[in-house]
Image: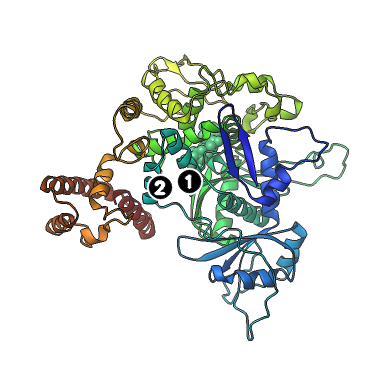
């Protein structure tokens, strides 16, 4: 089954899971045909899916038959998805037919607390114990795994080769999006991690809800992106009905700082009560207090905040704009990747851009005439009573949710292909007057800058704020330089013949690593010479060894000398950044691994 997103020129086909489609996209005959589903509908269906799912740690993917056979004794199974985490452990996400089915299965689970420090806890993450004694007879069935190794991220060399083989730059951009964007299992697991917290926190908060937001759900996320979570306990209409005379006594948060205190408590619960949660770090003095943790069973880095509803509505807004113009998603995913490679964005926050304001830059560009996207003001103008949302601190997050109600002529007026859009994006910002103008997706036009901060991007939901207030003068200058370089690169691609940095390759891969790749590639295969073969354990480049190895693959002495110089400078750069102190050796090793993979 597939969902068709039709724009004037493009037909985008995105695979979705069967069950998911059944609920979201198949409608009764009596329904009026609709082009767009709402964000709320998608969230509701994903949450329901998580409420009838279980993640089971197994021995390997061949445990499928035994697990299927065992669980089908208790309940009907929709599908089983397999994945491995970075520790090489195997897991299966089972989606049952109903939540009641899952309850039956949970009733049959046992605890395993041999250790006195361990107090048993129920959550949707379990493990499958080896059968005691004689092996049970397997139930006959015709099911197969819905997906095997479902979290595998495409190998960079394979990706580069596929990009190299594309016919057009537009194909490259689309391929990049299709190959790297968050897949169905990635989304399911994010909702499972949210569900786990919801189940565990529900004994402390009434009507608790934990929900993913940010790039996990806004349509711009890549495989492996961080998981932003929001904890809320908003009352239902029923619960706050005035006619009910018996009202629960409640506890006011003494000493103020409510959000920070709740986040602090969540931190303690994560440490003590949430299986799979590790490396818990509280960031309580930020504007939005968060607790960061790693979820070991799913390999996710999570940021949990309390009641930051405007952040969740912001994700909804980005998702909606992406739904109006699927080309916006493909373009933004590429621009995010380009910015990371150009060193404009970094994993840690600082005096530079992050992915969120960068995405606003893309959306703003697409609002320019002929416009692919409408200004946010238009969505606000068309909002109805049911679209009213007031978030924390009275932030007004009201805008039209049902995009079917938007006049079709207010968006999609641009027929440019992705290549043209990308080029025009870089050209647009090469000429943008950053000194005097601010970017506002509310009006879709550049407006006068209210202050002299180097980069001014209006916060769409709180228009008095600048989402890029942290960006320094130097970083803004670098942005201007990099967009000019990128425009120049794309322009020269159109004129010149195909080289190894053809099209988007020159934007997403640094020149030095491309040079090294070229030199180290063995024949036509994707296999490269390992860095381990080249450097000693103490990370000192064994120059003679490198020379000998490189000479095996290339003839030209100058190429060998150049590549050694590049390697040395990479090593010096790495050494400099190695002076950073890491939280623990695992993080340090991870950073080293990422850098090493970047090089070779
Ligand atoms: P990556 O995590 O880098 O993949 O991107 P992201 O889109 O998830 O960005 P980030 O984790 O920094 O922020 C998470 C979400 O919070 C964003 O997608 C926005 O929806 C929202 N957000 C970020 N900054 C602000 C802000 O200043 N105000 C509001 N209301 N929401 C914000
Ligand atoms: Mg995020």
**Direction from residue 468 to residue 309 in the image, left or right:** right
Q: Is residue 416 above or below residue 577?
A: above
Place of residue 254 in the rendered image (x, y in percent of width and height, measured from the top left): 63, 43
Q: How many labels does the image show?
A: 2
Residue at 71% across / 66% down in the picture?
106
Whether residues under marks 2 and 1 lie with C-beta atoms below 8 angstroms apart, the answer is yes
Place of residue 381 in the rendered image (x, y in percent of width and height, measured from the top left): 67, 19
Give the CA separation, mark 2 to mark 1.
Answer: 8 Å
Which numbered dot is residue 554? none
Q: Is residue 287 above or below residue 529?
A: above
Q: Is residue 104 visible?
A: yes
How packed is label 1: few (under 14 Cα within 10 Å), some, or many (20 or more)?
A: some
Between residues 542 and 313, which one lies in front from this camera angle?
542
For label 1, the SS is helix
> Which of the 4 image quadrants contains residue 489?
top left
For label 2, the SS is helix
Place of residue 506 in the rendered image (x, y in percent of width and height, measured from the top left): 32, 37
Between residues 570 and 515, which one lies in front from this camera angle?
515
Q: In this view, does 442 lie above or below 525?
A: above
Q: Name the residue under label 2.
A: 159
Residue at 39% across / 50% down in the picture?
158
Whether label 1 lies within 8 Å of ligand 1 gets the answer no
How packed is label 2: few (under 14 Cα within 10 Å), some, or many (20 or more)?
A: some
Residue at 66% across / 26% down in the picture?
399
Q: Mark 1 points at which residue?
A: 179
């Amino acid at each position: 089954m597939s969902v068709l997103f039709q724009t004037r020129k493009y037909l985008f086909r995105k695979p979705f899971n069967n069950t998911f489609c059944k609920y979201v996209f198949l409608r009764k005959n009596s329904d009026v045909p609709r082009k767009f589903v709402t964000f709320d509908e998608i969230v509701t269906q994903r949450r329901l899916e998580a409420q009838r799912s279980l993640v089971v740690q197994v021995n390997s993917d061949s445990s499928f038959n035994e697990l299927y056979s065992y669980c089908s004794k208790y309940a009907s199974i929709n599908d089983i998805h397999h994945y491995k985490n970075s520790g090489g452990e195997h897991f299966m996400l089972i989606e049952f037919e109903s939540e009641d089915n899952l309850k039956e299965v949970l009733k049959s689970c046992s605890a395993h607390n041999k250790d006195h420090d361990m107090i048993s806890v129920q959550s949707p993450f379990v493990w499958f114990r080896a059968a005691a004694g004689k092996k049970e007879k397997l139930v006959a069935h015709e099911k197969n795994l819905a997906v095997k190794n479902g979290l595998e991220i495409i190998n960079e060399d394979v990706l580069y080769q596929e990009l190299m083989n594309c016919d057009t730059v537009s194909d490259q951009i689309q391929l990049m999006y299709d190959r790297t964007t968050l897949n169905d299992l990635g989304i399911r697991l994010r909702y499972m991690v949210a569900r786990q917290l919801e189940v565990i926190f529900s004994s402390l908060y009434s009507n608790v809800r934990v929900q993913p937001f940010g790039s996990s759900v806004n349509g711009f996320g890549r495989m492996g992106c961080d998981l932003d979570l929001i904890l809320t306990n908003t009352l239902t209409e029923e619960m706050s009905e005035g006619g009910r005379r018996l009202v629960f006594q409640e506890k006011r948060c003494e000493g103020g700082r409510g959000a920070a205190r709740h986040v602090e408590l969540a931190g303690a619960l994560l440490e003590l009560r949430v299986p799979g949660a590790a490396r818990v770090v509280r960031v309580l003095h930020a504007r939005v207090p968060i607790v960061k943790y790693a979820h070991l069973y799913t390999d996710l880095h999570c940021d949990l905040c309390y009641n930051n509803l405007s952040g969740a509505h912001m994700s909804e807004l980005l998702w909606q704009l992406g739904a109006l113009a699927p080309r916006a998603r493909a373009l933004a995913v590429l621009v995010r990747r380009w910015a990371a490679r150009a060193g404009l964005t970094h994993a840690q926050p600082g005096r530079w851009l992050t992915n969120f304001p960068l995405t606003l830059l893309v959306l703003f560009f697409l609002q320019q005439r002929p416009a692919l996207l409408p200004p946010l003001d238009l969505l606000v103008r068309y909002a109805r009573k049911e679209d009213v949302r007031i978030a924390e601190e009275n932030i007004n997050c009201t805008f039209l949710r049902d995009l079917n109600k938007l006049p079709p002529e207010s968006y999609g007026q641009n027929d440019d292909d992705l290549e043209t859009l990308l080029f025009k994006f870089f050209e647009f910002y090469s000429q943008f007057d950053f000194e005097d103008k601010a970017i506002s997706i509310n009006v879709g036009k550049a407006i006068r800058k209210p202050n002299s901060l180097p980069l001014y991007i209006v916060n769409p939901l709180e228009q008095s704020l600048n989402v890029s207030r942290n960006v320094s003068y130097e970083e803004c200058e670098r942005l201007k330089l990099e967009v000019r370089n990128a425009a120049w690169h794309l322009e020269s691609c159109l004129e010149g013949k195909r080289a190894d940095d053809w099209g988007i390759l020159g934007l997403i891969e640094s020149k030095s690593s491309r040079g090294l790749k070229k030199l180290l590639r063995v024949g036509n295969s994707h296999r490269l010479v390992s860095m381990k073969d080249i450097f000693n354990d103490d990370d000192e480049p064994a120059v003679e060894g490198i020379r000998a190895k490189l000479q095996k693959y290339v003839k030209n002495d100058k190429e060998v000398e150049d590549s050694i110089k590049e390697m040395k400078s990479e090593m010096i750069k790495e050494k400099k950044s190695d002076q950073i102190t890491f939280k623990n050796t695992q993080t340090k090793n991870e950073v080293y691994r990422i850098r090493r993979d970047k090089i070779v």
